[in-house]
Image: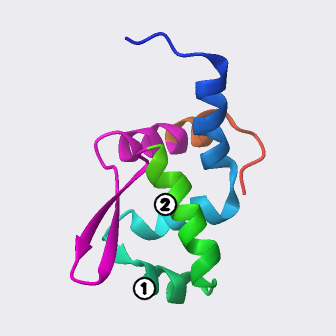
Amino acid sequence: MKNCSDETYHIFFRNLASPLRISIISTLKKNPHSVNEISKKLDIEQSKLSHALSLLNDCHIVNVKQKGKQRIYSLNKKVILPMLKLIDSHNCDFCPNKR
């Protein structure tokens, strides 16, 4: 296991602390989507969405593939989906203020 600094954790969890970025992650849980599709689903302007996607991509939380003129985003299912399941399980078992 690599030795990570506190700053590394801060960067990663800051991505998960953003309501917009969590909405993007939730949108991509089942299927990949283009920026336009995500924008419509979340009712958010594309420039704000593109900035959030760039931050998620920089941290490899999402993957991006070019398909013609479209950029198709998908969730890094190898790492992020198991982490989300762990968080859900932890929340159900231990967090008293469930929403």
Quadrant of the drawing holding the C terminus: bottom right
The residue at 52%/45% (across/down) is 88
- At label 2, the amino acid type is Ile
Inspect this view and state whether residue 78 appears: yes
Inspect this view and state whether residue 23 appears: no
Is 12 within the magenta? no
Quadrant of the drawing holding the N terminus: top left
Rendered image: mark on residue 25: 2
How far across and how far down the image is residue 65, in percent? 26, 65
Task: Name the residue furthest front.
Answer: 69
Please report whichever mark, 2 or 1, sits nearer to the chain's N-terminal start: 2
The residue at 49%/60% (across/down) is 25
How far across and how far down the image is residue 15, in percent? 61, 47
Q: Is residue 31 left or right of residue 46?
A: left
Q: Which of the pair 90/35 is nearer the observer?
A: 35
Q: Is residue 39 left or right of residue 7?
A: left
Q: Secondary structure at mark 2?
A: helix
Q: CA distance from mark 2 to mark 1?
A: 13 Å
Q: Which of the pair 87/54 is nearer the observer?
A: 54
- At label 1, the amino acid type is Glu
Do the residues bearing badges 2 and 1 touch, measured as CB atoms within 8 Å? no
Name the residue carrying label 1: 37
Q: Is residue 1 above or below residue 39?
A: above
- Extent of the magenta region: 60-88
